[in-house]
Amino acid sequence: MFQNFDLGVFLLAVLPVLLAITVHEAAHGYAARYWGDRTAEQMGRLTLNPLAHIDLVGTVIVPLIMFMMTPFLFGWAKPVPIVPRHFRDARKGMRMVAVAGPLSNLAMAFGWGLMFALAAHVPESYQYPLSEMAKYGVLVNAVLFVLNMVPILPLDGGRFIDSFLPARQSMQFRKVEPYGIWIVLLMMMTGVLGMIIGPVVNLILGLVSTFAGILA
């Protein structure tokens, strides 16, 4: 059954969501280039153009259906191509590439917090839409940061953990990867995911709120 679709909410959330996924993927690409892999750059994926990172199913269809039919919002972008053998240090390179995306979301959460603080100083007619957009920006990026650091492959947290594992344990751990997204979806639908990431998301929201309050 469709929940009440609010076009205003949808339009205000579009820019924060697009920036969140675009900068996240670009951060992976820039980190990979720093460690010696220029694959993303050569394939035109080292860009902040959202069109280069949009996956029709994961970025458009699935999030739209979930937004309209459930209280959840879930989706994914087209992964930036990474070739670990090009890294100067394969393990350290994969580790840094994995955390680059989530850390970009954490930085953007504080960036939107700054925007929220500045909204009070723009013309009155722009204050409400700008502050609401900033709220969605903070929330989306806080959730993406925490969600992506869950230690399940193919999430970034899983790749981060995998970079520390010995070869044999890594091979066993990677066997979960084909089922990782389904595991996350099941955890989401049953409420387990919310119980796990909710406290951390709330902690980040509190920190950003304090940050914005100091700057206001």
Image (cartoon, grey):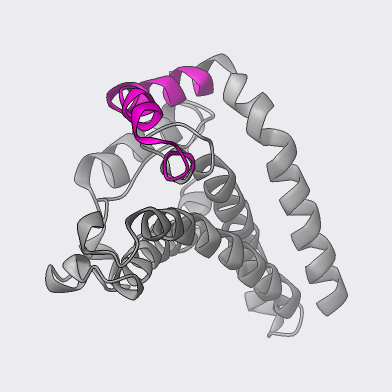
* Residue drawn at 23 percent across, 64 percent down: 51
Is residue 168 inside the magenta stretch? Answer: yes
* Residue drawn at 78 percent across, 70 percent down: 212
Across and down, in percent, residue 135 comes to 65, 58
Q: Quadrant of the C terminus?
A: bottom right
Q: Quadrant of the N terminus?
A: top left
Residue 118 visible in this rendered orientation of the protein:
yes
69 left or right of 121 in image: left
Depicted 32 relative to depicted 58: above or below: below
The residue segment tinted magenta is 161-188
* Residue drawn at 27 percent across, 25 percent down: 178
Residue placed furthest toward the left: 43
> Which residue occupies the foreground of this view, 57 or 153?
153
Across and down, in percent, residue 67 comes to 44, 36
SS assignment for the magenta stretch, majority: helix
Is residue 135 inside the magenta stretch? Answer: no
Depicted 123 relative to depicted 168: above or below: below
> Which residue occupies the foreground of this view, 110 or 175?
175
Across and down, in percent, residue 213 comes to 85, 69
> Which residue occupies the foreground of this view, 18 or 79?
79
* Residue drawn at 31 percent across, 50 percent down: 77
Residue 81 visible in this rendered orientation of the protein:
no
> Which residue occupies the foreground of this view, 202 or 117?
202
Across and down, in percent, residue 124 comes to 71, 79
